Image: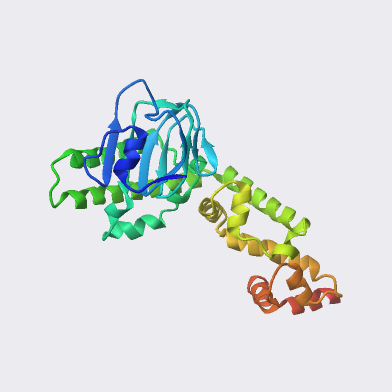
Amino acid sequence: MQHFKTLSSYLDYLGLPRPEHPMLSVFNSKGDGYLPCPRESSPPITNDCYSISFKKFVEGNLNYGRTKYDFTNGALIFIAPRQVLQWDNSVVFERKGFSINFHEDFLKGTELAHQIKKYGFFSYSVNEALHLSPKEEKQIELIVENIEIEYQNNQDEFSKDIIISQLDTLLKYANRFYERQFLNRKEIASNLLEHFNQHLTEYFESGQLQEKGVPSIEQIADKMNVSQRYLSDILKKETGKTTTEHLQLYLIDEAKNMLLHPQKSVSEVAYELGFEYPQYFSRLFKKKEGISPSAYQQKHSLN
């Protein structure tokens, strides 16, 4: 897979102009009509740059991460360094839109270098991109215009700090808008939780639990074709519980059913549920149920 270490080499590959700054490029188009992708098609590629783009695709397929980009209403897309991109020769998008690309070293020595890693949307698959309302779109456009003005100006000792500040503001607004998007996704969250539990059931019933142990959240997210971070954010926002907590609740529910059989010891139940150490299972059970598994078994065997 081809990898681009510099911003200039990446833009050269795309057929775009060389950047005004060696580590930063800003493209902001306000025209009408349609625009083909600068490079007709591309096999999977990666680079060392962050990208923040707003585009409305008219047709074509852009593969980003696990899935195809198929939105027609436009979305704000965040791409982190070393994420995989691929597109075909049918990609066409509206001329209006922007793209800000900056090398990860552009942030070195700044607070944003640490803060940007906390924004979950940089780890999302493209089908989890941020959709903007017209009002939100205008707010983002104003920030991008400020960045573009500073980018086009003669660079001085204040330029980088001002641009970093504007990027920080843009990301904070994006974070706010993601919160809004999550609040409007009750049905999606419900479906995700249903699929989450369905995958766990299939995993248990196939015997993989005894063979491979408790599945990781990453494994489950991969099976669901979403990113681990997105799955966790959606479920946490809608249910108040993380994916790990949902996994633990599922295991505890299974354990409660198994403990109804008095012939099974607590250790046997723990091992059958994929726990390597029965002591950890007992602590988790008591934490969730307020009673030890042995006491739970004794209590219900007496009823």
Q: Is residue 291 visible?
A: no
The residue furthest top is 33
Residue 143 higher or lower than 92, as above or below: below
**Residue drawn where x is 61% and y is 61% of the image:** 216
For this orientation, the residue located farthest to the right is 263
Q: Does 13 sit left or right of 66 as displayed?
A: left
Q: Position of residue 116 (x, y in %)?
A: 36, 55
Quadrant of the rendered image containing residue 142: top left
Figure quadrant of residue 99: top left
From the viewer's side, name the closer residue of 246 and 20. 20
Quadrant that contains the C terminus = bottom right
> In the visual, does 5 lie left or right of 216?
left
Percent x, y of residue 265:
80, 77
At 29% from the left and 42% from the top, the residue drawn is 8
Indicate the position of residue 48 as horizontal and vertical percent values: 37, 49
**Image: 109 above or below 170:** below
